[in-house]
Amino acid sequence: MALLVFIATGVLLVAILLWGIGSGLARLVGIIMFIDGIGGMFIRGGDLANTRFPIEAGIGLALWLAGHWLYALKHRLWRSHLALVVWRLPILSLLAPIPTR
């Protein structure tokens, strides 16, 4: 029983931290990872034999989008115009937490 309470407390703490600073942290880490991935592909001359850089860029973009999604969910507005434009894309607009008009 004590283990179950410990796990539930840990999950609750992670949820509170994600809600409090998750959107900013996800946007920051996401843009850093995206730039590092694109830069790595550029430095390596587009050699896609090493899949680390495209995967890193993809994860960074996903984190950046997730950070903006969480911000829009919390504050009912988009943090930047670029995020609004990206979330207006046909498939992503279906997943947006608020209207993208």
Image (cartoon, grey):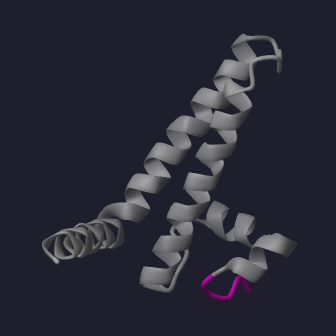
State the extent of the magenta-drawn residues as a range.
97-101
Give the residue at x 42% y 81%: 74
Number of numbered discs overlaid on the protein picture: 0
> Compared to 70, does 99 lie above or below?
below
Q: Position of residue 89 (x, y in %)?
A: 82, 69
- Seen from the viewer's position, the closer of residues 23 and 79 is 23
Residue 90 is left or right of residue 27, and the answer is: right
> Compared to 21, does 12 lie above or below?
below
Residue 45 is left or right of residue 64, and the answer is: right
Q: Is residue 16 magenta?
A: no
Give the residue at x 54% y 43%: 31
> Compared to 91, does 59 lie above or below?
above
Task: Quadrant for residue 23, please give it.
Answer: bottom left
Residue 53 is left or right of residue 6, and the answer is: right
- Seen from the viewer's position, the closer of residues 101 and 29 is 29
- Residue at the right extreme of this rendering: 90
Q: Position of residue 48 (x, y in %)?
A: 83, 21
Which quadrant is home to the N terminus? bottom left
> Compared to 3, does 58 lie above or below?
above
